[in-house]
Image (cartoon, grey):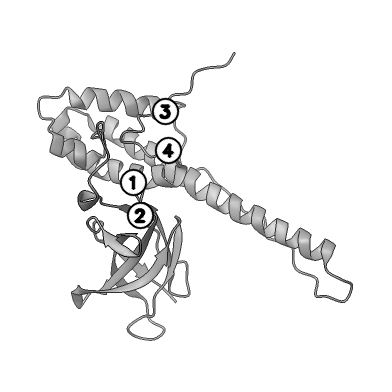
Amino acid sequence: MATTEIIPSRKWYPQDLAGQAVWWQNHATQFAVVGPDLGFSPAEIADVQDDNTVVQFLAETMEQLDAFEKAVRQYRDIIMKQPVGEPTPAFPANPAFALPEVVPTGINQRLNERVRRYREAPAYTEEIGALLGTIPTGSGPTPESETKPVIKAFESLGLFMFKLRVVKDGMPAFKVQISRMDSADVWTDAAFATTSPVTVTVVPTTPGQPERINVRIVLLKDNLPVGVPSDVIQVTINP
């Protein structure tokens, strides 16, 4: 028998999996800090971290599956459509997945129930709701001057590259900016993109050596900055 899907409010919850992964990372991180004041037990806070772990795994797995499908299609086109004598490509390696955590069905339902519960807590404020990412946008959109992207980065992919997920809040494009640890106030543009996730390559200060850098996102509209920059995160780039 079919059941009704439970989806959190689109007024505060991203509707795409990549955006949800970014949202969940922030929500779980902040909830670990404010959860005790809102009346949640250590076990309940740990359950939120486990749900987040599974969401991150699902988002990363879908990205790998999409990349594998694309690689197989490229193999198909070459092996079938190119003439005899052209180089024969290697078939793409099958991705391997291992679920990092087993959680009960109902991540979205648990989220909805948790939001309702902490909104009724005596210690709850709108500032806490904003930290947790559950303040409804209301009847109108957020003013462009207040638009702020949310980001999540993954450690270096090697070759001094790292991957970044971005919630653009409706803006068409964004730029990735970096600063070095010894000059944190000096920001330089490292990449421009219109879709998430984006892979960024950074030239290290010392050739061949790993480096810790600061990263932020600036939203763009008509090629001009709009809103406020994202929170700053740190990423290690590796050779």
| For the residues bearing labels 1 and 2, Cβ distance under 8 angstroms | yes
Label 4 sits on what residue type?
A: Gln
| For the residues bearing labels 1 and 3, Cβ distance under 8 angstroms | no
Left or right, 200 with reference to 149 = right
Residue at point 28%, 30% (across, down): 44
Q: Secondary structure at mark 4?
A: loop
Label 1 sits on what residue type?
A: Gln
First along the sequence among labels 3 and 4: 3
First along the sequence among labels 1 and 2: 1
Nearest to the eye among marks 4 and 2: give it.
4
Please, is residue 55 above or below residue 229 in the view? above
Left or right, 39 with reference to 97 = left
| Residue at far right of view | 84
Q: Which residue is mark 1?
A: 25
| For the residues bearing labels 4 and 1, Cβ distance under 8 angstroms | no
Residue 54 picture location, percent across and down: 44, 40
Q: Which residue is mark 4?
A: 15
First along the sequence among labels 2 and 3: 3
Left or right, 104 with reference to 116 = right
Residue 185 picture location, percent across and down: 17, 72
